[in-house]
Image (spheres, grey):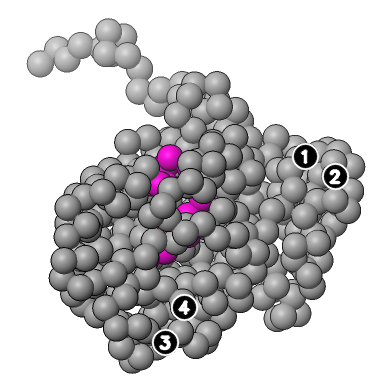
């Protein structure tokens, strides 16, 4: 289930890739699965995902007529379902009071599924439940990232790619500051020529439009159109040496970081913030840095350059981790296990226990000993 009134956009984020990839793999295994949208008819983004089954509903309440297992991928108002539903938790809990209460209401009757151990702990605190009640189903890199041939390298040229959305929380401003840091500018004195490429992913959002206009005039940035398919993104990544993920940690924490595993499958070195779920994306070719720190990002890029190209054997080992097969195996294991108490059921049980009379009379009413 995708959010009511929202299209499923191609090439804009990990949640979309995660959803479509799992639907594709489930159908490949003979398990009927589809993406369900609300209120948009056939103009719901399906044109960007050929071969993926879509179902368009007119109203959110129509979810109650679906006779299969419902997995809410993004925000969706509380609705009754035929079978116990699940909720994917792709992002951190909201920070503002109003959205926080709304999110608690939405998820109260759904079995939560996080995308990392970090995210599970974050949501367990938010929902006030034991972390063991939240399952973890890791994202994956599509097969194309591990199989696409890498482009030939030019001596003394290092190609750096930022493939995140054009939004402050993804660290785009940290990257811009890094471009002017002496640790980067002095590389030219050593005969190393760096190129920086940024995609237009997220440029359709209000913040993204502002950042896009700024990047379009920046002489140190090559701006390229966002890739809309795994094959196109794999081709872009294999044409670069380093992928940077300088995610912000002031008010945003990556719950996983699918770009990191895609890049490592593609044979790139990754420089990423040591924050949130990103440490769980280590496939053997990643350097972690302090978040929100332009100097740390510059030093991380220099370390990646010093390490040199990822050897073919190391790339092969990376592609054995976080595969689509592993992810869907985890998902099916969660869907098939006996029903686990939802956050609402746990709270209801605790409240019921609290209302029960005490098995022991109060101390003041107990008979005093005559010894």
Q: Which residue is mark 2?
A: 40
* Label 4: element kind: loop
Looking at the image, residue 54 lies above or below residue 263: above
Locate residue 282, reporting x and y percent: 32, 69
Locate residue 283, reporting x and y percent: 34, 74
Are the two marked residues, 1 and 2, in contact with CB atoms closer than 8 angstroms?
yes
Q: Which residue is mark 1?
A: 5
Q: Which mark is residue 240?
A: none
Are the two marked residues, 2 and 4, in contact with CB atoms closer than 8 angstroms?
no
Disc 2: CA contacts within 10 A as few (<14), some (14-19) or many (>=20): some
Check residue 190 for magenta coloring.
no
Nearer the N terminus, badge 2 or badge 3?
Answer: 2
Q: Which residue is mark 3?
A: 152
Instruction: For marks 2 and 4, give the CA distance.
Output: 36 Å
Locate residue 180, reporting x and y percent: 26, 49
Residue at x-position 63% and y-position 35%: 106
Nearer the N terminus, badge 3 or badge 4?
Answer: 3
* Label 3: element kind: loop
Nearer the N terminus, badge 1 or badge 4?
Answer: 1
The segment highlighted magenta reads 160-172
Residue at x-position 35% and y-position 23%: 360
Are the two marked residues, 1 and 4, in contact with CB atoms closer than 8 angstroms?
no
Are the two marked residues, 1 and 3, in contact with CB atoms closer than 8 angstroms?
no
Nearer the N terminus, badge 1 or badge 3?
Answer: 1
Instruction: For marks 1 and 2, give the CA distance.
Output: 6 Å
Q: Which residue is mark 4?
A: 238
């Amino acid at each position: 289930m995708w959010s009511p009134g929202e299209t499923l956009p191609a090439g804009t984020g990990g949640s979309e890739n995660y959803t479509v990839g799992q639907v594709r793999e489930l159908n490949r295994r003979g398990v009927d699965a589809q993406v369900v949208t609300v209120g948009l008819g056939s103009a719901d983004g399906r044109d960007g995902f050929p071969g993926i089954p879509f179902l368009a509903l007119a109203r959110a309440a129509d979810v109650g007529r679906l006779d299969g297992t419902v997995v809410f991928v993004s925000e969706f108002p509380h609705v009754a379902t035929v079978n116990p539903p699940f909720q994917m938790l792709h992002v951190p809990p909201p920070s503002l009071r109003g959205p926080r209460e709304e999110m608690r209401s939405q998820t109260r009757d759904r079995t939560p599924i996080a995308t990392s151990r970090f995210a599970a702990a974050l949501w367990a605190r938010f929902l006030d439940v034991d972390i063991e009640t939240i399952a973890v189903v890791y994202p994956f890199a599509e097969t194309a990232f591990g199989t696409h041939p890498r482009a030939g390298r030019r001596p003394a040229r290092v190609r750096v790619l930022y493939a995140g959305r054009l939004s402050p929380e993804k660290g785009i401003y940290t990257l811009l500051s890094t471009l002017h840091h002496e640790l980067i500018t002095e590389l030219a004195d050593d005969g190393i020529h760096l190129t920086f490429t940024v995609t237009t992913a997220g440029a359709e959002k209000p913040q993204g439009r502002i950042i896009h206009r700024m990047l379009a005039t920046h002489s140190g940035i090559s701006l390229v159109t966002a890739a809309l398919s795994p094959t196109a993104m794999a081709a872009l990544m294999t044409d670069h040496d380093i992928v940077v993920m300088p995610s912000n940690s002031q008010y945003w924490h990556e719950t996983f970081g699918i770009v990191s595993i895609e890049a490592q499958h593609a044979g790139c070195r990754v420089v990423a913030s040591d924050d949130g779920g990103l440490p769980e994306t280590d496939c053997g070719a990643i350097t972690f840095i302090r978040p929100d720190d332009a100097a740390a990002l510059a030093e991380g890029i220099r370390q990646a350059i010093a390490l040199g190209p990822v050897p073919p054997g190391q790339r092969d080992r990376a592609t054995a981790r976080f595969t689509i097969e592993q992810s869907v195996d985890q998902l099916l294991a969660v869907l098939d296990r006996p029903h686990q108490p939802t956050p609402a059921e746990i709270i209801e049980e605790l409240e019921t226990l609290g209302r029960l009379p005490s098995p022991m009379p109060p101390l003041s009413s107990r008979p005093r000993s005559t010894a």
